[in-house]
Image (cartoon, rainbow, N blue to C red):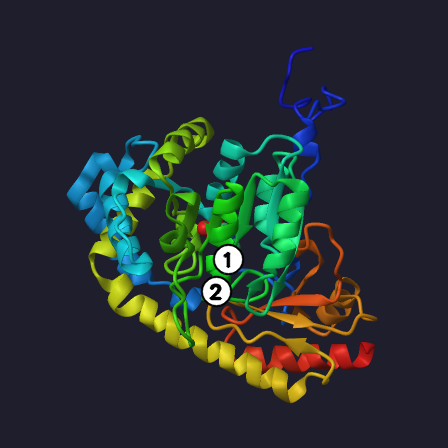
Amino acid sequence: MVTTVENLHETIIKDWPFSVKAVGLEANIIREILKISSRPGLINFAGGLPAPELFPIDDLKAAAVRAIEKHGAETLQYSLSQGILPLREAIAHRMSAHVHMDFTPDIIQITSGSQQGLDLVGRAFLNSGDYVLTERPTYLGALQAFNFYQCRYCTAELESDGMNIAEAEEKIRRHNPKLIYVVPNFQNPAGITTSGEKREALVHLSRKYQIPIIDDNPYGELRYSGERQPSLKELGGNAVIQLGTFSKIVSPGLRIGFIAACPEVMTTIERVKQSTDLHSSTFDQWVLLEYINSGKLDSTHIPLLRDEYGKRRDTMIEAMERAFPPDVTFTRPEGGLFLWVRVPSKLSASAALNNAVEAGVAYVPGKPFYPHGDNDNCVRLNFCNATHEKIKEGIRRLAEVFRSLI
Ligand SMILES: Cc1ncc(COP(=O)(O)O)c(C=O)c1O
């Protein structure tokens, strides 16, 4: 049969032969919740979205014009899989300042966001059936990225100062994981920061059992209070593969992140990057470079984000202290985007989401952040995306929902 405009949509392939890996992927609940967030009047604490009104639009526009004017066709051409050299130099320079050790551009791989960094790590290291040790709860997007490689998880409880180290060691002995995955700064979802002591203990475990640590660090530069902790990389050196991103400090739409790893790892990472998408957007890399080189990211933009996000965190915490029932508890993060609410065990946070959406407020139930889905009494709230007025009103609505259900 010849395909014509009329029969174009007829079912020709009746049973699409999808791969087992693709069929095994579950929809990301946050992306699903984003779909309902367009409901009129809904106050959305669910997504991981930074505040759009704080994007440096004029400065990025100027950076885009400068990039084209200065570098012309080069900005629109294919480029190195590892990423354009001047951007890797700029990132190495910024990392050297933040991580307190010398970074060189040859150990930086540009990625299309940290999410791709996670995928490349999965491609490079994980075989079907391998174990990954994670915090419990952990970043849902990492689980999704690693799930594609059909790995399994062993977990250690995330306490108020980081992973339970005794439990981590016990799980390492029992399951011999390939990787240790952590978000040590202002963790997504729980907002917890790993203490210096536990960072040292993690590095000790990594050395003792010869397991690389994946340090996923999108929020490290967004600290609003408390003391800087030493980075895992400066404590653990080559054993630590660090992921970074400009999504939360510039714009997630740029999709520019990076992996910093030792040369032995970098060769493989560069190859898997090449096989995935050849390279990240050349144009976006030049625009970001121009923006970084303008000096505004470090001199004005990040200080602005720290100031405003810190205030929004305080607004949300004050509102929760006033309105939440006493048996609903929550974390008080020192930075990042998220805080973590614990409801009494008789209340299912997943089921309560329907009531919350009816009341005009959305959150992400905590369950999908548990690799084994074994806790439904937690809620993740983004405190950065809504204005102060909406934060107060949203928390008032949420408190009413909790009160009515408890
Ligand atoms: C811990 C963590 N890792 C990675 C990502 C992905 O970020 P990106 O936008 O750079 O892909 C996020 C985004 O929320 C995150 O919270």
- Spot occupied by residue 371 in the image (x, y as percentages of width and height): 68, 50
Determine which quarter of the picture holds residue 366.
bottom right
When the figure is inspected, residue 108 is found, relative to residue 269, above or below; the finding is below
Disc 2 residue type (three-letter)? Glu
Disc 1 residue type (three-letter)? Ala
- Spot occupied by residue 10 in the image (x, y as percentages of width and height): 72, 24
- Residue lying furthest bottom: 322
Q: Nearer the viewer, residue 28 or 283?
A: 28
Q: Are marks 1 and 2 in contact (CB under 8 Å)?
A: yes
When the figure is inspected, residue 242 is found, relative to residue 227, above or below; the finding is above
Which residue is drawn at the image coordinates 82% and 76% (left, top)?
405
Determine which quarter of the picture holds residue 43.
bottom right
* Left or right relative to 83: residue 159: right
Give how far apart the Cα atoms at labels 1 and 2 are: 6 Å
Q: Residues within 10 Å of mark 1 (few under 14, many from 20)?
A: some
Visible in this render: residue 238?
yes
Which residue is drawn at the image coordinates 44% and 61% (left, top)?
219
Q: Residues within 10 Å of mark 2 (few under 14, many from 20)?
A: few
- Spot occupied by residue 339 in the image (x, y as percentages of width and height): 57, 70
Which residue is drawn at the image coordinates 46% and 58% (left, top)?
200
Give the residue pinned by disc 2. Answer: 197
Q: How many marks?
A: 2
When the figure is inspected, residue 57 is found, relative to residue 330, above or below; the finding is above
* Left or right relative to 313: residue 151: right
Give the residue pinned by disc 1. Answer: 201
Report the quarter where the N terminus lies: top right
Dot 1: element:
helix
Report the quarter where the C terminus lies: bottom right
Visible in this render: residue 61?
no
